[in-house]
Amino acid sequence: MTRLLITLCFLCATTLSITAQTESVQQQIEAYQKAPKFVKEGMPPLPDASRFLPAPTSENDTKFVSDSCMYEWGKTFRGTLRGDTAIADAGYGISYFLKRFSPAVNQNLTQETHPLLTQLLLSAMNAGNMSIQKAKKKYARRRPYHHFGEGTPVPQDEYPDDFTSYPSGHAVRAWMAAMTLTAVSPEHANDIMKIGYEIGQSRVILGFHYQTDVDAARLAASATFARLCAEKSFHEAIEEARKELTSKR
C-alpha cells in the first residue's frame, strides 16, 4: 500500500514538474557543482569517456539504421502515459530525481528529510556528468530532433546550436543515481535500476538522444561508479545514507 501511494503521488506530481520548477536551471546545476567531491585533486582522476568510448555512429553509416529505428520507436510513446513520464523525466534537479526514485524504496525522498542521501546522490551524479564532458565536446554529435527536423514534446529544451548528444547527460546522471541508491538500499535493487533505466529511455522517447547516446552514458556511469568505489569516503557516505534511509522506515 505504501508503494502504491508513493507511486500515485509521483504520477500526480509529474504533470507539474516541467511547468512549476521551484529552482532555476542554473540553481539546479550549481547544486551539483557545489556537492562534495570524492575524487579530489592529486588523486587518480575520474574516468574520461572521450578516452575509452568509441566514436558515435555516423549518420552516413549503415549502423545508424538502428538509431533511426529506435527514434521511431520512441515516437510511438508520445501522447501516452509513458510519454508523459518521459516529459517529466526531462527534469534536471535533484528534487526530481529523489521524487522519481521514491516508489522504488517505499519512502518519500526529499532534500529536507534525507539530506545525507541527497548530498551523496548529488556528488555521484556530478562525478558521472564530469566524466562525459570531454566526450561531448570531442564528438559534438547532432541531436535526433536536429537530424530529423522534428520537434520534441519539450520544446523549451530545444536549442539550434546544441551538438552535445553523445553521451547523454540525463542518462549518465540517472544511471549514477540508480547504482548509488542500489548500494544504499540493495534490497530494492531491481526497482531502483528499473527506474534508472527508464529515465535513460525517456531521452530516446523525447527525441533528445539516440539509443547509442544512452547506452554510452550507462557505460561511462559504470566506469565512474567503479572509480568512486575505490575511495573510502564514498563507502562511508553510502553507509551514512543507508542509516538515514533505515531510520525513516
Image (tube, rainbow, N blue to C red):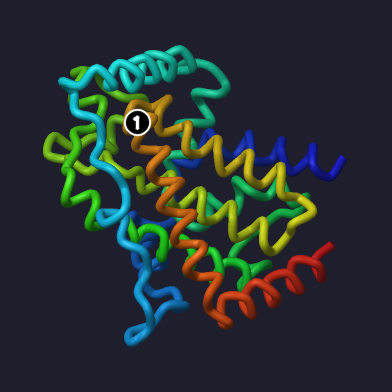
- 119 with respect to 216 (left or right): right
Vertical position of residue 10 compared to residue 77: above or below: below
Vertical position of residue 57 compared to residue 99: above or below: above
Q: Where on the picture, by quarter, is residue 198?
A: top right
* Count of numbered circles on the image: 1
Residue at the bottom extreme? 42
Vertical position of residue 72 compared to residue 47: above or below: above
- Helix, strand or loop status at disc 1: loop
Residue 48 percent coordinates (x, y): 31, 61
Residue at the right extreme? 1
Q: Residue at x 87, y 40 (%)?
A: 1
Q: Where on the picture, by quarter, is residue 154?
A: top left
Q: Residue at x 15, y 20 (%)?
A: 60
The local crowd at label 1, few if under 14, some if 14 to 19, many if 20 or more residues have their Cα within 10 Å, is some
Residue 243 percent coordinates (x, y): 76, 74
- 109 with respect to 14 (left or right): right
- 245 with respect to 58 (left or right): right
Vertical position of residue 29 compared to residue 86: above or below: below
Question: Where is mark 1, residue-wise?
Answer: 154
Q: Residue at x 33, y 33 (%)?
A: 209
Residue 158 percent coordinates (x, y): 24, 34
| Pick the front one: 63 or 59 | 63
Q: Residue at x 45, y 58 (%)?
A: 223
| Pick the front one: 37 or 28 | 37
Q: Quadrant of the C terminus?
A: bottom right
Q: Amino acid at mark 1?
A: Val
